[in-house]
Amino acid sequence: MRFRHHTNDLAKTLSFAVIHVTLAIGIGWLLSGSFVFGTLLALVEPLCNTVVAHGIGALMPDAHRSQRSALAKSALVGVAHLLVAVVLVRIFTGSFVSAWLYAVIEPAANAVAHYFFERWWHRGAARPVPGSETAPA
């Protein structure tokens, strides 16, 4: 399939977004026992995290000016992301165990998936495209 060798960043991002959401739905479904809750979780959690990250950005608008502030802001966003996932899964499942499992497993699963996706996406990038070789001079 030629599509995967395309250098379009938007196509690559959207392709991985499908994988990311599919994993989130599947993991949410496994932990909640409900496909509907798994799907809602996979859609609501990123929206909540986006709002929280925006709020943190508004509270720390100049964090990019120093490395220490930028690291602090990134750490705060990371902790907030984890807590949002825990709270939402707890609401959806009623279980703190499921909440912490989701908050740890979902990002880990996506990190592993991202590694293999990157390898797949760039597979053959070092090889020349057939018919593009030029004859030696």
Image (cartoon, grey):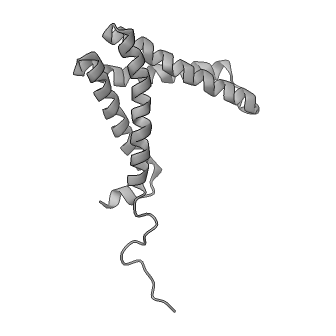
**Residue 123 on image: x %, y %:** 40, 59
**Towards the viewer: 88 or 55:** 88
Task: Tell which residue pokes out farthest to the bottom in this image.
Answer: 137
Res. 94 image quadrant: top left
Left or right position of 14 against 52: left
> Looking at the image, is 89 positioned above or below residue 137?
above
Nearer to us in this view, 51 or 83 = 83
Residue 130 visible within the image:
yes
Q: What residue is drawn where x is 74% and y is 33%?
A: 67
Give the quarter of the image for residue 91.
top left
Q: How many numbered marks appear?
A: 0
Q: For residue 106, what is the image quadrant?
A: top left
Q: Quadrant of the N terminus?
A: bottom left
Q: Residue at x 49, y 15 (%)?
A: 83
Q: Taking 134 as reference, is 68 above or below it?
A: above
Q: Position of residue 135 (x, y in %)?
A: 45, 88
Taking the spot 37% from the left edge, 35% from the top edge, the residue there is 20
Question: In the figure, 103 relative to 120: above or below?
Answer: above
Left or right: where 60 falls relative to 84: right
Image location of residue 15, percent across then percent down: 36, 45
Determine the residue positioned at 42% across, 72% down: 128
Between 123 and 15, the one nearer to me in the picture: 123
Depth check: give the residue in front, 122 or 100: 100
Residue 89 visible in this rendered orientation of the protein: no
Farthest-out residue, right: 66
